[in-house]
Each structure stands twice: as C-alpha cells, then as structure tokens.
Image (tube, rainbow, N blue to C red):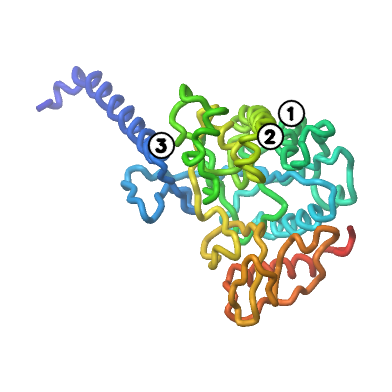
Amino acid sequence: MIGRKNMGRASPLLLVLLALGFFFATYNFLTMIIHYRSVGKWVGDNSNGGLLSDPIIGMPEDVKKFKNSKSPFHVALTATDAPYSKWQCRIMYYWYKKNKDLPGSEMGGFTRILHSGNPDNLMDEIPTMVVDPLPAGLDRGYIVLNRPWAFVQWLEKATIEEEYILMAEPDHIFINPLPNLAHGGYPAGFPFFYIKPSQNEKIIRKFYPEENGPVTNVDPIGNSPVIIRKDLLEKIAPTWMNVSLRMKEDTETDKAFGWVLEMYAYAVASALHGVQHVLRKDFMLQPPWDLEIGKKFIIHYTYGCDYNLKGELTYGKIGEWRFDKRSYLRGPPPRNLPLPPPGVPESVVTLVKMVNEATANIPNWDTQ
C-alpha cells in the first residue's frame, strides 16, 4: 500500500501505469471495431453519435463512443443536364432546405456537381459547380463512370468549408434531419444487400491483391450515401476513378458487376487506402422493400413501386397503381400524383406525398 508520504515517489510509476491503461483501452476500442468489421459484422450508429451494433449482434457498452460537438458536412451530388436528372435534383434540394436547419441536423452547404461540361437552367436555383465529363467514349455508355471523375475535379477546384462531405444522389429525399454519422477516420456508409465482395473474391482480387489483406476489408457499400472526412475522400477519389475505369475495361468484371460496377470500385478504392466504414442500416430506406420510415434519414427511390388496387405489390409487373422514376425520363412528373391505394406500405405513401409537396412548392415545376 502506498502511503501519503510515498505518493511523490510513486507518481511516475502511476503515471506510466495510467498511460498504459489508456493506451490499451484505446487499442481495445479500435481493435473491437476492426474485429467486428473484419468478420463481416456491421457497426451502427444512433442519432446521438453513439456507436451501436446491429440489433442481432451484441456490442459491449464500453465500445460506444459519443460526440460532444457538431461536425457539419457538405452535401454533394453528381448530376447531368438531362431532364430526368434535373427534376430529381430539384426535389432533392427542396427537402435538403426543409431539413437543413431543423434540430438534429448537421447538414452544411450544398453543391450539385454538374458533369455535363456546360451550365444549365438550374444554376440559379441550385448551388452548382460545372465540371468536365470523361473524354468521349471512355465511359463506354456507362454514364455513372463520370461520378468519380466529377468528384476528383470538384475536390481540386472547390473551396469546401466543412471538414466532412456527404456523397448523395439525385434520387435521395431527406425524411429526417441528418446528423453526421461518421466518426473521425471511420466514414459512415449504407450496406447494400447486393454488394457482396466475399462472394466475388476472384474478381475483387484483380483489384485488391491478397497482400492488401482479407477481402472482408472491402465494405458492402457504394459511394452513396457516404459521410466521409474531406481529406480521406481526396485520397480515395483518384483511386476510385482509376479502379472504375480498370473494372470497366475488364470484360469479366464488367459482366459480373454490371450497373453496380462503380459502387464496387469505391468500396475497393477505400480498402486500398485502409479506410473502412461504419455501416448504418438506418442511413437509408428503399421502397418498396423497406416498409416503414421509422428513424431512417433518406428515401432512395431507385426501385419501381407497382401495386394492384388491393394494395398488393406486383413487382416486375406494371401495377394498376405505380410510381417509377423511369416513367419520367423525358420530363418531370406532373404535380399532385395520385396516392397509392389502401394497404400500400408507409414508405411508398410517404415517398409520393413528399414528391407531391415538393412539386407543389417548386416554382416553374414544368420547366425542362
């Protein structure tokens, strides 16, 4: 036992022990996160900034981490000057403005990164930076390849005040105020059920060799939605662009990954830089498969919603009632779309109501 008289002599030893204790506590915290990620588990995050596990997987209380201050993020999305892209951007920007200053939001500025090479008629409505498309023919008809190239240019040219960036898409609608879900060097991403690096290891290894680590280091994500520290994205973006182009040039990879090729490219590029994401199932919902809004933050309306008049889903067959963004390739949807029949899930009803509210309040909605 150390008496009061011996405290002075014992202080250096105590300080060393305390320092070692802090080191190992920190090490165990980080190791726990990395362990959970390496075995394919995901770590969630609540709106108060605490790390949480998937409800199916237990997580010790001492692994939780809480933020004490706000960390604003810049909202950025890539877009073209096609009517199909423009009307989605207008709805997305409307709901960004509605949610930006609400309690719980950490949204900062907003930029539409227009990769058509020329200004369009939305420049005064939506904050926009014009960047160049890829050289003609390089995208091989896969226009999404322009996305990483657009981010590379924007990061080089723009003055971005926020430390963090949310990479979003035109077909995102903010349904709740969005906090910063990232934790320092751990960006936040959404786990897509159809991005399966482990099941495609043979192809992944073409771009992520074994010496880089296990294939489970490649997260089951795309680039959007992702909240990431700006300096990390500046490192990842050029690699993301190059991996996307290499994947598109490889016939086997192009055939296997198809329209999600660029998503795999971002996941691989992140892993090449040693960046792994906190996976947030509450980041986004996707009607018609996700039925309830709950405490989720974004609606992603990439899938068509087809129902009969009994409120039954008829996916793959045009329904008696439907909402599908692809029905409006050449111009915006009309105002006051009919609501779904009784029995249709809350997520679909909310989506249509939010589209209707936006179109009712955006001036000159029918403008191409």
User: On the rendered image, what quadrant is the C terminus found in?
Assistant: bottom right
Q: Which residue is found at the position 57% from the left and 28% from the top?
A: 207
Q: Nearer the viewer, residue 101 or 240?
A: 240
Task: Confirm whether residue 237 shows in the render.
Answer: no
Mark closest to the chain's N terminus, 2 or 1: 1
Q: Amino acid at mark 1?
A: Glu
Q: Which residue is found at the position 65% from the left and 55% from the top?
A: 101
Cα distance in 3D space between marks 2 and 1: 24 Å
Mark closest to the chain's N terminus, 2 or 3: 3
Q: Which residue is found at the position 69% from the left and 70% from the top?
A: 318
Residue 289 image position (x, y, % from top left):
56, 63
Q: Nearer the viewer, residue 105 or 14?
A: 105
User: On the rendered image, what quadrant is the N terminus found in?
Assistant: top left
Q: Which residue is found at the position 12% from the left and 26% from the top?
A: 3
Picture disc at residue 6: none
Residue 368 drawn above or below residue 248 = below
The answer to whether residue 31 is left or right of residue 78 is: left
Residue 298 drawn above or below residue 159 = below
Under circle 2, the secondary element is helix
Mark closest to the chain's N terminus, 3 or 1: 3
Residue 198 image position (x, y, % from top left):
47, 39
Residue 225 image position (x, y, % from top left):
61, 47
Picture disc at residue 248: 2
Number of residues whose C-alpha sits closer than 10 Å to that of mark 2, classed few (under 14), some (14–19) or many (20 or more): many
Under circle 3, the secondary element is helix
Q: Which residue is mark 3?
A: 38
Picture disc at residue 156: 1
Number of residues whose C-alpha sits closer than 10 Å to that of mark 3, classed few (under 14), some (14–19) or many (20 or more): some
Under circle 1, the secondary element is helix
Q: Amino acid at mark 3?
A: Ser
Q: Amino acid at mark 2?
A: Lys
